[in-house]
Image (spheres, coloured by chain):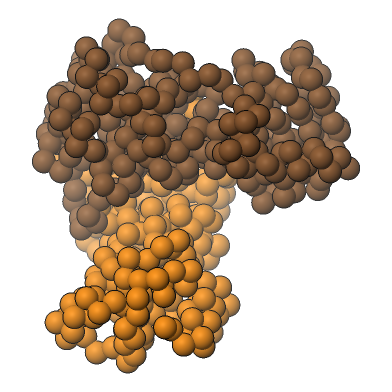
Chain colours: A orange, B brown
Amino acid sequence: MIPKAKSKFIKSLQIKKYRKQEQCFVVEGKKSVAELIRSEYEVVSLLATREFLAYQRGQGKNIAEVLEVDVDDLTGLGEFKTNDGALAIARMKPNVPLEPGVNEWVLVVDDIRDPGNLGTIIRTADWYGVSKIIASEQTAELYNPKVISATMGSFLRVSLYYTSLPEFLSRSASGIAGAFLDGDDIHHCSFEAGGLLVIGNESRGISEDVARLVTQRITIPKYGRAESLNAGIATAVILDNLRRNQRKV
Amino acid sequence: MIPKAKSKFIKSLQIKKYRKQEQCFVVEGKKSVAELIRSEYEVVSLLATREFLAYQRGQGKNIAEVLEVDVDDLTGLGEFKTNDGALAIARMKPNVPLEPGVNEWVLVVDDIRDPGNLGTIIRTADWYGVSKIIASEQTAELYNPKVISATMGSFLRVSLYYTSLPEFLSRSASGIAGAFLDGDDIHHCSFEAGGLLVIGNESRGISEDVARLVTQRITIPKYGRAESLNAGIATAVILDNLRRNQRKV
């Protein structure tokens, strides 16, 4: 059984205000928790089955509080409907400035409000070898449990930096690519070896202040009749074309 | 004000059992409802603001029941947190068999359980000019309000046929492409002018019974460390490569 105060604390971390106050967030599921334990994140508490704890002890990570629980004890504590045997509370990382390195592509997300979309974008960035994301201040919070779960563990390998995009972009020496309806067809255009790729908000696209700073306007060619693509989908298609283009060089 | 019985009826359509019983589903938002009115779907009821109704009268569609409401009256009736002025109840279409035409690509979804994923796949198919989807019987229901809203209106242009996939695929004369970890790199392989493209379930991929029938094993190249891609993302990246490949021919 989980002490009432503990389960109340875990549930409180679903709410942004309490996450901010405690500087803690929740990671759910054996796979993600196992990756978390192997990461540089500080793990404050671990609640897991006996089997999982045996695994954890082999990892040599110092965890302040470890509780052995049954799978059923974890139900309803977090975002997941059911939990397969592990839940951890980890310490948030500070919001540290990020810059693109030499020949590095970095994503810039302009007000991605939907946590599921942000999580999928992080997972997709990780697949395509992008490890830094610059996020506008209105973007969903990385430590929102819906974001964390949609990343499928990729939040451990991709870093986010929340800042004012017009300020960040106007100081940047990198080329800035952004998707518009009237840009160059990504099936035919060339991409630099590195730069910034801006992904716009789900409903209104790239904001005006950011659009002014874009140096390469690109377009995903359309073959049918949908008016637009989901933001995560657009990110993936552009990154796939970008990587494909770089392979040829 | 909306009569209590009416709002109760609309809310009941969030539940599959009642949708099946009534053979009706809900469409929310001015944009989607406007497209619905111009489509061949039978609209049973329309609840909308005075402005929207003025538009609707211009479309000449016969609607059994029309109610003028305030924007606020629509809040909480459907899947949306807020509604911008229109909600409609439409009649479901029967589950009619679909076959790929000559030189046509058709999607096959193997147990896509998440309604948001299915909706995004339908929207993406519509973008890439795919208008038919064959769905396994365990796939999320098209008329689930989460599916309808994630399609952003594309459910009006893309048809779904629910059936047993092993049966359907074993009768098919078309080539069957499917994504696996050990297939041909989609950046380099060639696609036929038409065929079936199978998208696997979110967590376990393409099922064994279906995998046996795949004739072209393909792979999305990975540049980073994520273990997998979201099912909607994989669909988009494959369709983009497929269309790009066909342009060259």
Q: Is residue A62 placed above or below A71 in the rendered structure?
A: below
Residue at horizontal 47 percent and vertical 65 percent from the top: A79
Residue at horizontal 44 percent and vertical 69 percent from the top: A75
Q: Is residue B128 placed above or below A158 in the rendered structure?
A: above
Percent coordinates x, y for residue B166 in the rendering = 25, 26
Give the quarter of the figure containing the N terminus of chain A.
bottom left
Give the quarter of the figure containing the C terminus of chain A.
top left
Q: Is residue A184 placed above or below B171 in the rendered structure?
A: below
The image quarter containing residue A231 is top left
- Nearest the camera: B144 or B186? B144
The image quarter containing residue A169 is bottom left
- Nearest the camera: B104 or A11? A11
Residue positioned most to the bottom: A64
Residue positioned most to the top: B102
With A121 as the anchor, is B173 left or right in this view? left
With A11 as the anchor, is A125 left or right in this view? left
Percent coordinates x, y for residue A225 in the rendering = 49, 23
Q: Is residue A167 visible?
A: no
Percent coordinates x, y for residue B186 in the rendering = 18, 33
Residue at horizontal 22 percent and vertical 12 percent from the top: B173
- Nearest the camera: B125 or A84? A84
- Nearest the camera: A203 or B157? B157
Percent coordinates x, y for residue B190 in the rendering = 16, 23
